[in-house]
Amino acid sequence: MLRDNLSSQFALARAVGRSMLERGRGTVVFTAALLSFQGGINSSSAKSASPD
């Protein structure tokens, strides 16, 4: 699951990047919740990457 969490943004950007190149323009913006940077035992960001 952690591998998917870390590589899915790259795969998405690569896929949509092809169509952006064909059109000659486009923007990819990734956002994250502040809790994903802070972490915490009760936060969903900590649970989404945990193996259990």
Image: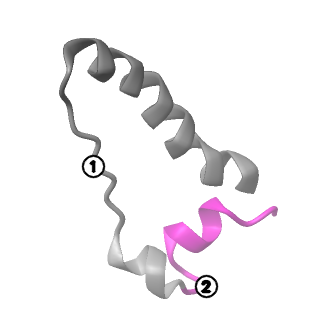
52, 2: nearer the viewer: 2
Side of 16 where 10 appears, left or right: right
Q: Is residue 12 above or below residue 42?
A: above
> Residue at image x 55%, y 81%?
42
Instruction: Find the distance from the CA under tag 2 to the CA under tag 1.
Output: 28 Å
> Residue at image x 60%, y 73%?
46
> Residue at image x 29%, y 42%?
28
Residue 29 lies, in percent from the top left, at: 27, 49
Q: Which numbered circle lies on residue 17?
A: none
Secondary structure type for disc 2: loop
> Residue at image x 46%, y 81%?
37
- Looking at the image, the residue that sits furthest to the right is 52
Tell me, yes or no, whether the two marked residues, 2 and 1, touch with CB atoms within 8 Å: no
Q: Callout 2: 10 Å neighbours few (<14), some, many (20+)? A: few
17, 6: nearer the viewer: 17
Residue 4 lies, in percent from the top left, at: 68, 45
Which amino acid, by three-letter code, is at mark 2? Ile
Side of 38 where 41 appears, left or right: right
Side of 7 where 42 appears, left or right: left
The residue pinned by badge 2 equals 41
Which amino acid, by three-letter code, is at mark 1? Val
- Magenta-drawn segment: 40-52
Q: Is residue 16 above or below residue 13?
A: above
Residue 44 colored magenta?
Answer: yes
The residue pinned by badge 1 equals 29
Residue 19 lies, in percent from the top left, at: 33, 15
Q: Which dot, 2 or 1, sits closer to the camera? A: 1
Question: What colour scheme governs how the chains and residues are painted in the rendered image of this protein?
Answer: one colour
Q: How many marks?
A: 2
